[in-house]
Amino acid sequence: MASSDANIKGDLTVESTAALSQTSITSTDKNARGETGPTIRPPDCAFGWIPTLAVMVNYMFIFGASNSYGVFSTYYLNQKFVGTSASTLSWIGSLITTFMLGCSFLTGALADKKGYRLTAYIGTILCTAAYILASFCNHVWQLILTQGILFGLGASFLFAPSVSIPPQWFSKHRGLASGVAVAGSSLGGLWFTAATQAMIDSIGAEWALRILGILTFVVTGVMNLFYFRRVPAKPRKNILELQAAKRLTFWLVSLESFAMYTGYWALTFYIGTTARQLGGTFQDGSNLLLVLNAGSVVGRILAGLIADKFGSINTLLLSLLLTVVIEMPLWIKATSLAPLYVLCALYGIVSPTFISLNPVIVSNHFDTDVLASVMGMTNLFSGIGGLVGNQVQGVIYDKYDKHEQFTNTIVFSAMFVLFAGLVIACLRFHIIRKRTDKRFFQKV
């Protein structure tokens, strides 16, 4: 009310001031209804964990599909489409990520303008349809359209509101809340991977897809009911938050997102085939993905806790550098399955922190009420990176590694992760440079 008093001092009487105050309260109450709950609640309140946990469950289904795609990839590459190149089959998995992230600049704006729940329910319907249609496909191009593009588009409608909910409800524990929510993607990868492998082995890939579709429809349909906003969105004319594009911080986060998604997915897509090359079974490949996702659950929550204490940018920078140190020697030098299990555990703990910390960084430097839009714009670059990276890695594996090793593919992946670390180092320098306190060692 202090700002209202400042605006009306001078000309208004006490009575008109009271009338204006009542109008402001009524307007706020109207904005608070519906998706914001009965009242606009303060940040860090216990109620915020309800939508945050709903996001965590939905993340199991949004990211579970891409995190467990390695099971389908191994099955397609070695059984259903034998003789088809890895680069061709990689289109399916890469398009899931590309459309999920690349379309979120539009679905994020839709979520801010039309509401979180409506946007999420569109996603639920599209993802379910994608699974069911994919179960009837017998050609790679059909799976590209259904399991790849259609599911990725549906996931984008679910992902856009999901990514902005935890940072909106928390301030002091923003990193932890984001980490808990995003840990759902790894939990989904855990049971998605195990369940998918078991279903493919017992009832076939077609029924595995149908059952995943039914589960997606039921579970996300219920969780969408708990998608509450804390802060009402501002009315606006433009579909994009164009002011964000005028800031260097936005472009540095976008560039880091592009680089990470270019290099990140190599291990997820090819660890199963690596296990086969070293004498392992399909089950060994599935088990490695389980270890990778189990490590990610720990890593994402731990990263959130560390970020709240030492800063999200500091935590992200350290994790990216450690990812390169872990990935290259353990994967390139592996001659048995044991090093691969160590690799998956450590890579899972350290590497995926960017997924939970990027929303925290954006929410720390942009307005809360436009988070879905700004995150959607940065994720456009993530989607492009995922498409470019997965396709290039497939070509490298076909042409240079010749289906005998992964050395060139690993180097390509690690160099982009290293580049992402350098970009975050530049972002850290840029933020410190604008502060009064310019110490090198500080919370950023």
Image (cartoon, rainbow, N blue to C red):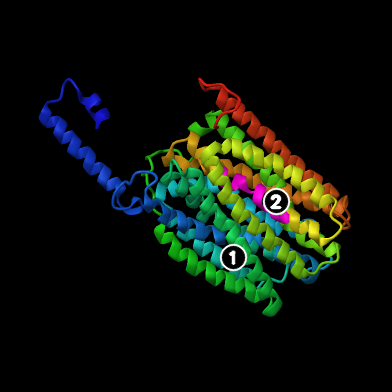
Binning the other alpha carbons within 10 Å of mark 1 as few (below 14), some (14 to 19) or many (20 upward) gives: many
Name the residue type under label 2: Tyr
Q: Work out whether 220 lies above or below 15.
A: below
- Amino acid carrying label 1: it is Ala
Q: CA distance from mark 2 to mark 1?
A: 30 Å
Q: Could you tell me which secondary element the residue under label 1 belongs to?
A: helix
Q: Residue at x 50, y 20 (%)?
A: 436
Give the farthest residue toward the bottom.
203
Comparing 167 with 383, the one in front is 167
Point out the tag, 2 or 1, that comes first from the N-terminus.
Answer: 1
Q: Position of residue 153 (x, y in %)?
A: 57, 56
Q: Is residue 169 left or right of residue 65?
A: left
Does 220 lie within the magenta span?
no
Query: Does residue 348 belong to the magenta stretch?
Result: yes
**Residue 396 visible in the picture:** no
What residue did someone put label 2 on? 347
Q: Is residue 399 left or right of residue 214?
A: right
Q: Position of residue 16 (x, y in %)?
A: 13, 31
State the residue at coordinates (69%, 74%): 200
Residues drawn in magenta: 344-357
Residue tagged by mark 1?
A: 130
Q: Are marks 2 and 1 in contact (CB under 8 Å)?
A: no
Question: In the picture shown, does residue 202 fall above or below 391?
Answer: below
* Residue at 19% in and 35% down: 21
The percent position of residue 37, horizontal first and vertical second, equals 32, 53
- Residue at 72% of width from left, 55% of height from top? 344
Please, what is the dominant secondary structure of the magenta stretch? helix
For the residue pair 329 and 204, the one nearer the viewer reads as: 329
Residue sitting nearer the eye, 146 or 412: 412
